[in-house]
Image: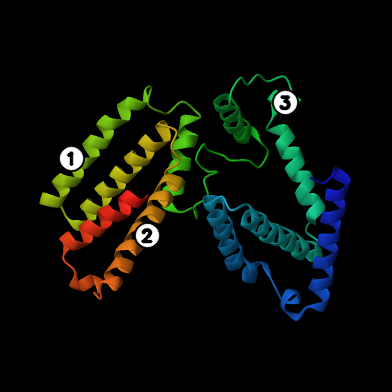
């Protein structure tokens, strides 16, 4: 691993390269916050893919791509006279110190849950910080991640089930309400009840220490792997999937499960 001095040198050299590209490369020179934003989203998802695969080499590469975007936005702001990468680092450093009074102050925090609860209280008090408990949840988050974040923030101020097992009654209640609306309700009411059911299931996952986004993505990947197996075996038999019976596909599905 590199020393602190080597890390600082590497970061400085990276910034020098970015400065040069911003002046001499036609593509880099014309980039704006608006033009970079879609690429930033893509880079974050590519990092997430590498993290899910536990691919160390790709994690390193994708972290570099994300860092490039952080530095690029800072460079654009510097050119406008708004701030630069040093301001970003200083503000982050100050925020980390302020939000860790159990390290840099006199606040006690015996475990991770107490640390998170302190964070939420601190963020409410910060100048220019969140005005309400839930106002810090980005509106653009994907719905599943947003639901989990909303529930975590509510938990941190004491709005939560006393025991995890209590959540299952809520899940069952929501299932019953979905079934009832499917029989008697409008599509709008069915949609609403499915939303309530999903929210309750996400709540259950959280209460049992499961990250619902990660859990669902693992299931997505498992389904893709097994379905690809069915498709591959069908081709070996000279068949198209649409020509196969459900029973034939189920048999191949079970073969794929046994291979895992």
Q: How crowded is the residue under tag 1: few (<14 C-alpha within 10 Å), some, or many (20+)?
A: some
| Identity of the residue drawn at 22% across and 35% down | 173
Q: Say whether residue 104 is visible.
A: yes
Going from N to C along the chain, the mark reached first, 3 or 1, is 3
The residue lying toward the viewer, choosing from 245 and 141, is: 245
Residues at marks 2 and 3, CA–CA distance in whole angstroms: 45 Å
Residues at marks 3 and 1, CA–CA distance in whole angstroms: 48 Å
Q: Which residue is mark 2?
A: 224
Asked where in the image residue 229 lies, by quadrant, the reply is bottom left
The residue lying toward the viewer, choosing from 252 and 1, is: 252
Q: Which residue is mark 3?
A: 103
Residue that lies at the very extreme toward the left in this rendered image: 184
Q: How crowded is the residue under tag 2: few (<14 C-alpha within 10 Å), some, or many (20+)?
A: few
Helix, strand or loop at mark 2:
helix
- Percent position of residue 219, x then y: 38, 50
- Disc nearest the viewer among 2 and 3: 2
Helix, strand or loop at mark 1:
helix
Q: Which residue is mark 1?
A: 176
Q: Is residue 119 above or below residue 31?
A: above
């Amino acid at each position: 691993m590199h020393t602190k001095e080597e890390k600082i040198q590497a970061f400085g050299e990276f910034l020098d390269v970015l400065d040069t590209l911003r002046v001499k490369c036609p593509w880099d020179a014309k980039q704006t916050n608006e033009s970079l934003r879609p690429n930033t989203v893509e880079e974050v998802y590519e990092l997430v893919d590498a993290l899910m695969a536990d691919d160390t080499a790709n994690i390193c590469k994708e972290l570099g791509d994300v860092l490039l975007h952080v530095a690029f936005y800072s460079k654009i702001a510097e050119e406008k006279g708004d701030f630069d990468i040093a301001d970003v680092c200083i503000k982050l450093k100050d925020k980390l110190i302020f939000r860790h009074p159990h390290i840099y102050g006199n606040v006690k925090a015996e475990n991770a849950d107490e640390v998170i609860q302190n964070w939420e209280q601190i963020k409410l008090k910060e100048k220019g910080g969140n005005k309400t408990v839930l106002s810090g949840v980005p509106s653009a988050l994907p719905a599943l991640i947003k639901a989990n974040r909303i529930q975590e923030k509510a938990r941190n101020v004491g709005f939560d089930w006393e025991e995890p097992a209590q959540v299952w009654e809520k899940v069952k209640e929501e299932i019953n309400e979905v079934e009832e609306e499917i029989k008697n309700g409008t599509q709008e009411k069915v949609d609403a009840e499915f939303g309530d059911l999903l929210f309750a299931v996400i709540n259950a996952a959280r209460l049992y220490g499961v990250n619902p986004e990660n859990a669902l993505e693992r299931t997505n990947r498992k389904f893709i792997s097994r379905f690809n197996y069915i498709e591959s075996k069908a081709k070996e038999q000279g068949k198209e999937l649409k020509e196969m019976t459900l029973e034939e596909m189920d048999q191949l599905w079970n073969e794929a499960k046994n291979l895992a």
